[in-house]
Image (spheres, rainbow, N blue to C red):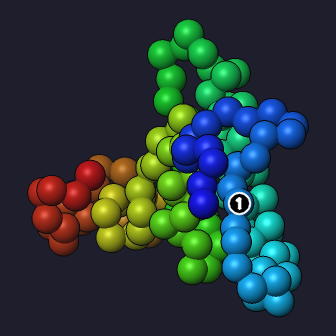
Amino acid sequence: MKRKPDGSKVVPGDVIVEFTGNYRALLTGERKALNFLQRLSGIASYANLCMQEIEGLDVEILDTRKTLPGYRHLDKYAVRMGGASNHRFGLYDMVMIKDNHIQVAGGIKAAVAAIRKKIPKSIK
């Protein structure tokens, strides 16, 4: 049973979740559940700390797509719960041109032109 909604501020002593059930099953899942909560709470807390640092400034904190395998949706959700924003979900939803691409293409204009020929206009 959830005691605190996602994204809530918590202080030591707050109960964030309670489980009931067979004690063997609870003990078996305890460490996994704690690791899961610690990871996602840590991401959300750090995102929130970053947001506090930029309060009042006209900037945005964005995450990367570098996430734990199998945890991308969860990690990105935790970023949002901390108040920051998701940049992109995968390689398919936004183009990134790096210095080596520019060099191979013969300059930034040539790199951008080559990419624009190959992707839909809906992709940033």
Q: 52 or 1, which lies in front? A: 1
Name above or below for residue 124 compared with residue 84.
Answer: below
* Image quarter of the N terminus: bottom right
Q: Is residue 25 left or right of residue 27?
A: left
Task: Tell me the crowding category of disc 1: few under 14, some 14 to 19, or many 20 or more residues within 10 angstroms, Cα based.
Answer: few
Q: 79 or 9, which lies in front? A: 9
Name above or below for residue 32 compared with residue 74.
Answer: below
Q: 118 or 19, which lies in front? A: 19
Q: Amino acid at mark 1?
A: Glu
Q: At which x and y percent is residue 63?
A: 55, 49
Residue in the picture at 40% in, 69% down:
91
Q: At which x and y percent is residue 70?
A: 57, 80
Dot 1: element: loop
Q: Is residue 41 left or right of residue 83?
A: right
Which residue position holds label 1?
A: 18
- Asked whether residue 101 is in view, the answer is no
Q: Is residue 122 left or right of residue 66?
A: left
Q: 67 or 33, which lies in front? A: 33
Name above or below for residue 51 compared with residue 25.
Answer: above
Residue in the picture at 46% in, 49% down:
86
Q: At which x and y percent is residue 108?
A: 37, 51
- Asked whether residue 50 is in view, the answer is yes
- Count of number-bearing discs: 1
Residue lying at the far top in this picture: please name it.
56
Q: At which x and y percent is residue 9?
A: 67, 33
Q: Quadrant of residue 89?
A: bottom left
Q: Is residue 28 left or right of residue 118?
A: right
Residue in the picture at 33% in, 70% down:
92
Residue in the picture at 70% in, 21% down:
53
Name above or below for residue 104 compared with residue 94.
Answer: below
